[in-house]
Image (tube, helix red, strand yellow):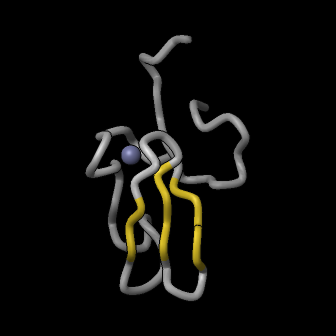
Amino acid sequence: MDKKDAMTAFRPMDDDHHVYQCWNCGSLWKFEADGPYENGWNVCPHCGLPIARSLEADDVSV
Ligand SMILES: [Zn+2]
Protein backbone atom coordinates (compact mmCIF):
# COMPACT_ATOMS: atom_id res chain seq x y z
CA MET A 1 0.00 0.00 0.00
CA ASP A 2 1.19 3.47 -0.87
CA LYS A 3 0.69 5.74 2.11
CA LYS A 4 2.28 8.96 0.88
CA ASP A 5 -1.14 10.37 0.03
CA ALA A 6 -2.86 8.86 3.03
CA MET A 7 -6.04 10.51 4.15
CA THR A 8 -8.79 9.58 6.52
CA ALA A 9 -12.47 10.38 6.76
CA PHE A 10 -14.79 11.01 9.65
CA ARG A 11 -17.93 8.99 9.48
CA PRO A 12 -20.97 9.80 11.57
CA MET A 13 -21.63 7.23 14.28
CA ASP A 14 -24.46 9.01 16.05
CA ASP A 15 -26.22 11.78 14.18
CA ASP A 16 -28.28 12.80 17.20
CA HIS A 17 -25.19 13.45 19.31
CA HIS A 18 -22.74 14.50 16.60
CA VAL A 19 -20.38 11.63 17.27
CA TYR A 20 -17.90 10.88 14.52
CA GLN A 21 -15.29 8.16 14.14
CA CYS A 22 -11.98 8.51 12.37
CA TRP A 23 -11.83 6.01 9.55
CA ASN A 24 -8.10 5.46 9.98
CA CYS A 25 -7.43 5.24 13.71
CA GLY A 26 -10.95 4.56 14.97
CA SER A 27 -10.97 7.41 17.47
CA LEU A 28 -14.37 8.73 18.43
CA TRP A 29 -14.93 12.48 18.61
CA LYS A 30 -17.98 14.32 19.80
CA PHE A 31 -18.84 17.74 18.43
CA GLU A 32 -21.09 20.32 19.97
CA ALA A 33 -22.86 20.67 16.64
CA ASP A 34 -22.44 19.44 13.08
CA GLY A 35 -19.30 17.61 12.03
CA PRO A 36 -15.53 17.99 11.75
CA TYR A 37 -15.49 20.41 8.83
CA GLU A 38 -18.16 22.61 10.31
CA ASN A 39 -15.93 22.83 13.39
CA GLY A 40 -12.83 23.73 11.41
CA TRP A 41 -11.04 20.40 11.61
CA ASN A 42 -8.66 19.58 8.77
CA VAL A 43 -6.73 16.72 10.34
CA CYS A 44 -7.49 14.02 12.88
CA PRO A 45 -5.95 15.07 16.22
CA HIS A 46 -5.14 11.46 17.05
CA CYS A 47 -3.51 10.02 13.93
CA GLY A 48 -2.69 13.31 12.19
CA LEU A 49 -4.04 12.36 8.79
CA PRO A 50 -5.88 14.92 6.66
CA ILE A 51 -9.61 14.43 6.75
CA ALA A 52 -11.21 13.82 3.38
CA ARG A 53 -14.05 16.21 2.82
CA SER A 54 -16.42 13.80 1.11
CA LEU A 55 -17.75 11.04 3.29
CA GLU A 56 -19.44 9.54 0.25
CA ALA A 57 -16.19 8.82 -1.56
CA ASP A 58 -15.16 5.19 -1.50
CA ASP A 59 -11.56 6.12 -2.14
CA VAL A 60 -10.59 8.74 0.44
CA SER A 61 -7.11 9.13 -1.06
CA VAL A 62 -8.39 11.05 -4.09
ZN1 LIG B 1 -7.50 9.43 13.21
Depicted 5 relative to depicted 60: above or below: above
- Residue nearer the viewer, 27 or 41: 27
Task: Please state the horizontal and vertical placement of residue 19, each as a whole percent of the image.
Answer: 48, 73
- Say left or right for 47 vs 33: left
Q: Residue at 46% x, 23% y: name it.
A: 5
Depicted 36 relative to depicted 56: above or below: below
Task: Please state the horizontal and vertical placement of residue 10, each as a whole percent of the image.
Answer: 51, 56
Identify the image quadrant of residue 38: bottom left
Q: Residue at 71% x, 53% y: name it.
A: 56
Q: Residue at 61% x, 32% y: name it.
A: 62
- Say left or right for 41 vs 7: left
Q: Residue at 58% x, 69% y: name it.
A: 13
Q: Quadrant of the N terminus?
A: top right
- Residue nearer the viewer, 51 or 11: 11
Numbered marks: total: 0
- Say left or right for 46 vs 49: left
Task: Please state the horizontal and vertical placement of residue 47, each as a whole percent of the image.
Answer: 31, 40
